[in-house]
Image (cartoon, rainbow, N blue to C red):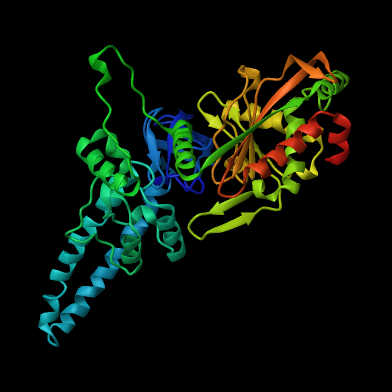
């Protein structure tokens, strides 16, 4: 029998939701054939079977959550029993030799037989205690810990999910990491360990303790358990999981950690829109047939980032360092139907507008189908979110942390404006730049957006200067 363990699916991914099984117990499966579709908090992935044989059992049903390190499926490879017999035969021969040696050593030191007896008991007790916190926590998602604590764990080579927590609400502290790295894998007997933060909403007492701890670090913060809404009418409840949960965590992190400031302006894209429509019609049946305004904006943003490096950076609040990125990977927010995904168009400074447009179309299509690779969601340096096709006049977007800026595009529409003392109808595109005020000021944002508006107002400038 072969037990297939869910492998590491990428940095920061601890669990996945079962979307679809390709087999049932009793089915035959070949090596590398699709076994199961799983959805993580980043994307949906198809997991192939590492072995061929007959499926003996599977982990659960569609909708269940499975954790990294858990058994996905058990496969009877046909030679599993023989292999098991061989492995079982080896340890039987070794113990058969040990009693002879021990019998020969009884005359030398009869007390040696008594020493091993208490030691295995102590080890067994500790071994029984060790997995408890890890197993209990692994089923509840990522362990609660501050970013600095996580970085410390990485530096010390410690798997933070295995560290017994002693902080409030099951939080792992730097002291816990140091203690675990030193070889002490059991929590202190007097440690006050509560349930993880994931369980806070289920346990009012734990929530109050967590709220008290949070309030001690965030003044005026007051967390209370939600009321029982069913008292006032019918309700429906579903778990916050996968992509939706990842979006929630990212937004909370960004809004709490980053001081957001928004700068707004309108771009007159009348000439650019005429040019775009003409090119789109001319390119029917070939590359660029779905040319959108977004591709031009991506190119204009890329040019702006070269001149304003502060918006193509990240700030480490713990080391108090700013990292300026000298590459340009623009994320494009996509409404996937299950939550917001941000696939990344890499190296936009080296690609034409047609190439960018084609790549955006491909990424957006696969995002809605749940077929993006994890790497296609990583490495972004700046994000653009376009709500124009959905309606609305403008928006104030949330920064995609750890980036420091995001551009929101509203709906381009015809409006009466004054040009040279006359009222004329022009196509106006509303733009909002939300940025991290720790790394840039309002004047920097104004210059960035003004230059972008200038380029978008004239397709000749955009093509020449990008």
Q: What residue do we see at 52% from left, 59% from top?
A: 320
Q: What residue do we see at 51% from left, 47% from top?
A: 10
In depth, the one of 64 and 433 nearer the eye is 433
Q: What residue do we see at 29% from left, 54% from top?
A: 165
Q: In the visual, does 326 lie left or right of 288? A: left
Residue 337: x and y in percent read 53, 23
Q: Which residue sits furthest bottom?
A: 108
Q: What residue do we see at 26% from left, 49% from top?
A: 168
Residue 309: x and y in percent read 69, 50
Q: Which residue sits furthest top?
A: 233
Q: Which residue sits furthest front?
A: 421
Residue 325: x and y in percent read 67, 53
In depth, the one of 433 and 145 nearer the eye is 433
Marker count (numbered): 0
Q: In the visual, does 89 lie left or right of 127? A: right
In depth, the one of 385 and 458 nearer the eye is 458
């Amino acid at each position: 029998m072969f037990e297939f363990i869910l492998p590491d699916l990428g940095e920061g991914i601890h669990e996945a939701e079962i979307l679809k099984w390709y087999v049932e117990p009793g089915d035959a499966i070949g090596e590398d054939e699709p076994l199961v579709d799983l959805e993580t908090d980043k994307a949906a992935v198809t997991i192939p079977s590492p072995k061929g044989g007959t499926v003996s059992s599977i982990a659960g049903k569609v909708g269940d959550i499975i954790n990294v390190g858990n058994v996905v499926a058990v496969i009877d490879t046909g030679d599993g029993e023989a292999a098991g017999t061989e492995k079982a035969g080896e340890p039987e021969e070794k113990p058969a030799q040990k009693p002879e040696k021990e019998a020969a050593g009884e005359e030398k030191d009869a007390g040696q037989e008594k020493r091993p007896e208490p030691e295995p008991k102590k080890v067994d007790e500790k071994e029984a205690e060790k997995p408890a916190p890890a197993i209990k926590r692994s089923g509840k998602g990522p362990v609660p810990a501050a970013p600095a604590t996580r970085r410390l764990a990485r530096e010390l080579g410690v798997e933070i999910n295995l560290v017994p927590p002693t902080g409030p609400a099951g939080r792992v502290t730097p002291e816990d990491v140091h203690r675990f790295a030193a070889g002490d894998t059991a929590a202190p007997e007097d440690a006050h360990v509560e349930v993880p933060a994931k369980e806070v909403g289920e346990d009012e007492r734990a929530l109050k303790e967590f709220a008290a701890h949070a309030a001690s670090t965030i003044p005026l913060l007051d967390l209370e358990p939600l009321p029982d809404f069913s008292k006032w009418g019918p309700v429906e409840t579903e778990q916050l999981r996968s992509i939706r949960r990842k979006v929630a965590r990212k937004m909370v992190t960004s809004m709490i950690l980053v001081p957001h400031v928004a700068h707004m302006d309108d771009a007159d894209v009348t000439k650019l829109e005429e040019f775009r429509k003409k090119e789109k019609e001319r390119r029917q049946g070939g590359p660029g047939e779905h040319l959108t305004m977004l591709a031009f904006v991506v190119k204009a943003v890329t040019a702006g980032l070269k001149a304003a490096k502060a918006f193509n950076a990240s700030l480490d609040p713990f080391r108090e360092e700013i990292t300026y990125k000298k590459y340009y990977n623009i994320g494009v927010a996509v409404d996937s139907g299950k939550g917001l995904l941000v696939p990344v168009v890499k190296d936009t400074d080296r690609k034409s507008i047609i190439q960018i447009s084609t790549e955006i179309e491909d990424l957006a299509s696969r995002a809605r189908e749940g077929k993006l690779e994890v790497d296609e969601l990583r490495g972004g340096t700046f994000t653009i979110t376009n709500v124009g096709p959905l309606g609305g006049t403008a928006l104030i977007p949330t920064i995609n942390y750890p980036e420091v800026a995001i551009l929101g595009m509203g709906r381009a529409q015809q409006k009466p404006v004054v040009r040279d003392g006359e009222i004329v109808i022009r196509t106006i595109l509303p733009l909002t730049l939300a940025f991290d005020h720790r790394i840039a000021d309002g004047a920097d944002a104004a210059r960035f957006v003004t230059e972008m508006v200038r380029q978008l107002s004239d397709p000749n400038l955009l093509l020449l200067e990008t």
